[in-house]
Amino acid sequence: MRRSKILYVPFWATYVFLYLPIVVLVVMSFNSGKSAYTYEGFSLKWYGELAADERVQTGVVNTLIVAAGSTAIATVLGTLLAVGLVRHTRSKALDALALMPAVLPDLVLAIGLLLFYGLIQMTLGLYSVMLSHALFSMAFVAAVVRTRLVGADSSLEEASRDLGAGPVSTFVRITLPQLTPGIVAGALLAFTLSLDEFVIAFFTIGNAEPTLPIVIYSMIRFGVTPKINALAAILLLVSFTAVIAGQRLTKIGESRAQD
Amino acid sequence: MLKIDGVTRRFGNVTALDDVSLQIEQGEFFALLGPSGCGKTTLLRIVAGFETPDSGRVTLDGEDLLSKAPNRRPISLMFQSYALFPHMTVAKNVAYGLERERLPRQEIKQRVGEVLETVGLSQHASRKPAQLSGGQRQRVALARSIVKRPRLLLLDEPLSALDKKVRADMQLELKRLQHEVGITFVVVTHDQEEAMSLADRIAVFDSGRVCQVDEPVALYERPRSPFVADFVGANNLFHGVASGLEALRSEKFGMLPGTPLTELEADSAALLAVRPENVELADENAARGLAGSVLDVSFYGGVSHISVDVPDHPKPVLAAVQGAASVQAGAKVKVRWNAKDAVIMAVDR
């Protein structure tokens, strides 16, 4: 079959549109000059300045605390949610409701959470951001684990019961090992989502020391410098690694399940 | 030993089991036979504890089973898919049930070793299920079920995933094992040959009801309903009415010889069934028999099947003879049988 060359144009145009800004961002982070727009020569000085910036440092620490905490909560709750949805209910409505936070606009979620925290008179801080992130990450974890659970053979669980194991023992020894790749993939996804989340964090952090995305936002207000490029490049590296690792793990799990 | 009393199970408006009662004795090899969707697997799952009947009672040695969770029943179920735990080795799979009983480690190790010896898998103890062949997986599943020494072992289509040669070996193996361990076996199958060769007694199921419970030979020779006659083994069936004599009155063929299994009212609807091996091929000038022409001859090694087209009969009449057949397709013949070799049964309207 003859393939039309014309169709390659939008194909490559899409890729250029998608990745050119990212490539420019990474290249400019090595700029020796002060401008974020004209490249003057190679240098690592912006990375050095970044490391020396205290606001960035606290931002990174806060972001890691929030990401780690929300990932832990979301992974546990999301997994349990998925098991409940697949094994213990046939309700399509509950299914849709559980996965809702993943598609709800961030802004809606942010305003809602802010009002809710106000209503129960909770003082805002890092932990309120953590809880908020856990809320929507949970939906993503549940979605990933759910797919795996649907593909898993439920007769394994029945066999375990038949051999004398109670429900808890069956869950820990049979169900969980089957789900591990899905759970890890979900956790990595939750971690990356929390890492660069801005809107919800901005609304629910109160007067606490800000997370990294908020730090970047306030830095940009005084103009874009290559320092921000350097920071973005590092974030990119971390996110990419997590996503690729997550995909790898899911694939390994799938090929194992097919054996 | 196992007593099933009036068990009914409905799924929506489909009745999977309709007032089923069965009694299975200690040490018996019992088969539940029926086409797919006849309810036999549902019954097995009720006994194992994964389904709850809408009504009826199930007791084991007089003890109520239905109120117990599956993990508290002294029963093992061998799944059709085997359901081996993919993340555990063969030895771990087999040890799983014993570990749940919190037995001492030494005893678990010993019993696992013994049972793997029995099923001939000692060499493969440290392999994962994915590294085994179908027949080996089946034996692991069996070992895992019997190592707990259950009072009753349920097997759901135990041989359906195996190819023909392995299946024949495993049939013998299953029988040997059942003898050796002395556990009561209940096997579910849709394969009537499998049921006949394995079981001491067979219950034939049709759309949620038990049609007949009998020993294999009795089931084969004296089917008590048209369904059983048709489902168990090959049979030539003729519709007609009871004549009051040792014959069926057929509209198209006149009187056909056969033995009524029960007292039949004259002129009531009846069915005559005659096995292929009891059908004799005669010369076309023979005094007695139904005239027809040979459609096809198939040679199976030990036996040959000859199908004979008899005008006005919906299906060709099947005859089986030992060794190679002496007739060829197209030959004019007559088919006949003796009254004692054919059975006549009532047809429910």
Image (spheres, rainbow, N blue to C red):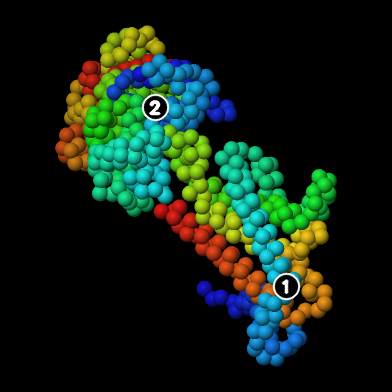
Write the residue at 37% across / 8% down. B265
Q: Relative to residue A142, is residue A155 depicted above or below?
A: above
Residue A54, numbered label: 1
Of the pair A66 and B185, the residue shown nearer to us: A66
Of the pair B264 and B180, the residue shown nearer to us: B180
In this image, A177 relative to B270: left or right?
A: right
Residue position for label 2: B74
Badge 2 local density, few (<14 within 10 Å), some, or many (20+)? Answer: some
Residues tagged by mark 2 and mark 1 found on one chain of the structure: no
Write the residue at 70% across / 55% down. A130
**Circle 1 — which element?**
helix
Residue A22 can be seen in this image? no
Write the residue at 75% across / 53% down. A128
Viewer-side label of 2, 1 = 1
Residue B86, numbered label: none
In this image, B3 relative to A124: left or right?
A: left
Image coordinates of residue A68 in percent, x first then y, are 63, 58
Q: Relative to residue B137, is residue B11 depicted above or below?
A: above
